[in-house]
Image (tube, rainbow, N blue to C red):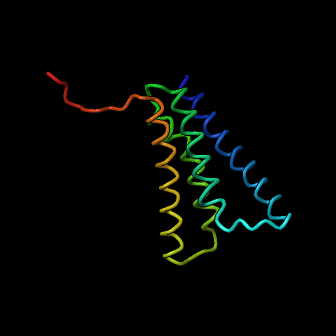
Amino acid sequence: MRLVAVVLLGVFVTFALTAVGEEAAMSLRDKGTRLPYFEVAVLFPLVALIVGSLIGLLARNKALLAAILAFAPCVVYAVLETGRGHAGFSWWLILMTLASIYLGLGVGAAVCVSGRMNRAVVPNF
């Protein structure tokens, strides 16, 4: 039950932080500030690191699974919504690469913060 709560919290916080960051970026753009790669280079990696760290703190033993499940809806939504209407192979390749990087950052942050990584399948004698 705790894992489900952590995953749902992670999904909610991911979408909420992304929306707040996008709103801040739009308000800065309306004032004339140029932010050409703000979402790609700053906002999305920062959201992934923050949410991944939060998941790692809350889901100590199952941080890897919780992070993958929490970031999956956001990654799928970003890929399908951003890629809608684009048919070029290079567009989809770049999009999938960026989505994989964000997923990796979030999952990596969760695993690092949890401090519990499966080191070996074979027991040490």
On screen, 75 above or below 84? above
Q: State the quadrant of the C terminus.
A: top left
Identity of the residue drawn at 60% across and 37% down: 10
Name the residue at the left extreme: 125
Camera-side residue of 6 and 87: 6
Q: State the quadrant of the N terminus.
A: top right
Residue 65 drawn at (x, y percent): 45, 36
On screen, 101 above or below 51? below
Q: How many numbered badges does the structure rendering display?
A: 0
Name the residue at the bottom extreme: 88
Identity of the residue drawn at 52% across and 40% down: 69
Name the residue at the right extreme: 31
Residue 73 drawn at (x, y percent): 58, 47
Residue 92 drawn at (x, y percent): 52, 70
Left or right of 95 in this view: 30: right
Left or right of 70 in this view: 34: right
Camera-side residue of 67 and 105: 105
Left or right of 23 in this view: 43: left
On screen, 116 above or below 77? above
Camera-side residue of 118 and 112: 112
Residue 51 drawn at (x, y percent): 59, 39
The part of the image, by quadrant, that contains residue 6 is top right
The part of the image, by quadrant, that contains residue 121 is top left
Identity of the residue drawn at 60% across and 74% down: 86
